[in-house]
């Protein structure tokens, strides 16, 4: 394969190394925090549909487009991009070689298509230059943290996107995708101290049971995201009847305020 095989040029190390550092023992209450939330959401919404993982490069392209864009629009934009250039898994060269304005037209359904079109073209060219071919399949050989560090060298690829690539794609590694929806729910529940998405993921991963594999983390993300879009919405959250109300300080405050302002 390309120069990526030996791992030295890309700053990656063999996956035979330890995947995670040792963690401090959790108290029983801490250890059950995330499983308890998961059980409550699962009981309320039911089992989410299992994801069909994409190859890492396709997932990376999708995740870059999906920022601040609804899932339906992101999925449609990916289909439009593939159709416009007869491209797709294993064949993203036509998009790499296309004009930015043509990529922009193909992904017009997403937010900020001008910026995203430029970044996608730049990304594909940079991967080709660094790897020697347009593929990310070599990432299967490497440690999760090294994969994420390597991906985050590219403009537009932050912790949320790198987590999506390693967790949602066929890499299927342990990571939590903390998008705006997930972050809102976790902050309202006060599960961990407030912080940005990167810090929140780091803190949450310390609470994740070691028995939770990549698929379980994906399922948990889907449930939390669904909850954020259904009841725990940005404005006027629907706290009454929420399955998490008994463990949600923010929801309990909201309900108390409603009772104080209710007509006597």
Image (tube, rainbow, N blue to C red):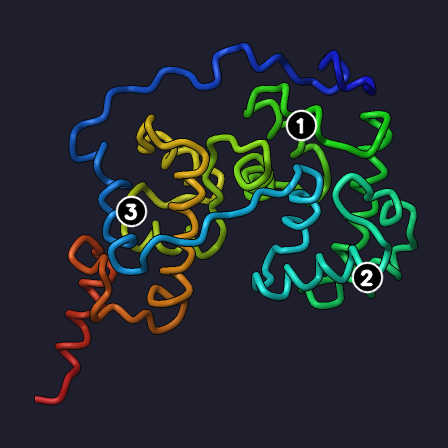
Q: Quadrant of the N terminus?
A: top right
Q: Which residue is mark 3?
A: 38
Q: Which residue is mark 1?
A: 150
Q: Which residue is mark 2?
A: 104
Q: CA distance from mark 3 to mark 2?
A: 39 Å
The crowding category of the residue bearing disc 2, from other C-alpha atoms within 10 Å (few below 14, some 14 to 19, many at least 20), is: many
Let me know if residue 199 appears in the view.
no
Q: Position of residue 74 (x, y in %)?
A: 64, 60
Q: SS class of the residue under badge 2?
A: helix
Q: Position of residue 213 (x, y in %)?
A: 41, 31
Q: Which of the 4 quarters of the picture holds residue 79? A: bottom right
Q: SS class of the residue under badge 1?
A: helix
Q: Quadrant of the C terminus?
A: bottom left
In this rendering, which labeled residue sits more in front, label 3 or label 2? 3
Among numbered discs 1 and 3, the one appearing first in the sequence: 3
Left or right: 231, with 50 as reference point:
left
């Amino acid at each position: 394969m390309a120069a990526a095989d030996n791992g030295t040029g890309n700053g990656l190390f063999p996956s035979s190394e330890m995947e995670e550092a040792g963690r401090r023992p959790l108290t029983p209450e801490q250890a059950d925090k995330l499983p308890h939330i998961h059980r409550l959401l699962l009981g309320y919404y039911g089992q989410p549909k299992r994801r069909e993982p994409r190859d890492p490069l396709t997932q990376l392209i999708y995740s870059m487009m999906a920022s601040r864009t609804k899932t339906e629009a992101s999925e449609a934009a990916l289909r439009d991009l593939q159709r416009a250039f007869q491209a797709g898994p294993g064949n993203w060269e036509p998009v790499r070689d296309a004009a930015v304005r043509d990529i922009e037209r193909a992904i017009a359904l997403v937010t900020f298509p001008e910026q995203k079109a430029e970044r996608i073209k730049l990304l594909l060219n940079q991967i080709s230059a660094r790897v020697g071919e347009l593929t990310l399949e070599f990432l299967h050989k490497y440690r999760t943290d090294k994969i994420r560090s390597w991906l985050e060298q590219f403009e537009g690829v932050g912790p949320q996107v790198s987590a999506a690539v390693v967790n949602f794609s066929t890499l299927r590694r342990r990571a939590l995708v903390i998008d705006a929806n997930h972050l809102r729910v976790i902050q309202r529940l006060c599960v961990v101290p407030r912080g940005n998405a990167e810090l929140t993921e780091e803190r949450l991963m310390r609470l994740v049971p070691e028995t939770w594999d990549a698929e379980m983390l994906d399922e948990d993300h889907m449930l939390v995201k669904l909850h954020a879009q259904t009841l725990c919405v940005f404005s006027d959250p629907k706290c009454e009847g929420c399955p998490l109300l008994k463990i949600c300080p923010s929801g309990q405050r909201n309900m108390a305020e409603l009772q104080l302002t209710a007509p006597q």
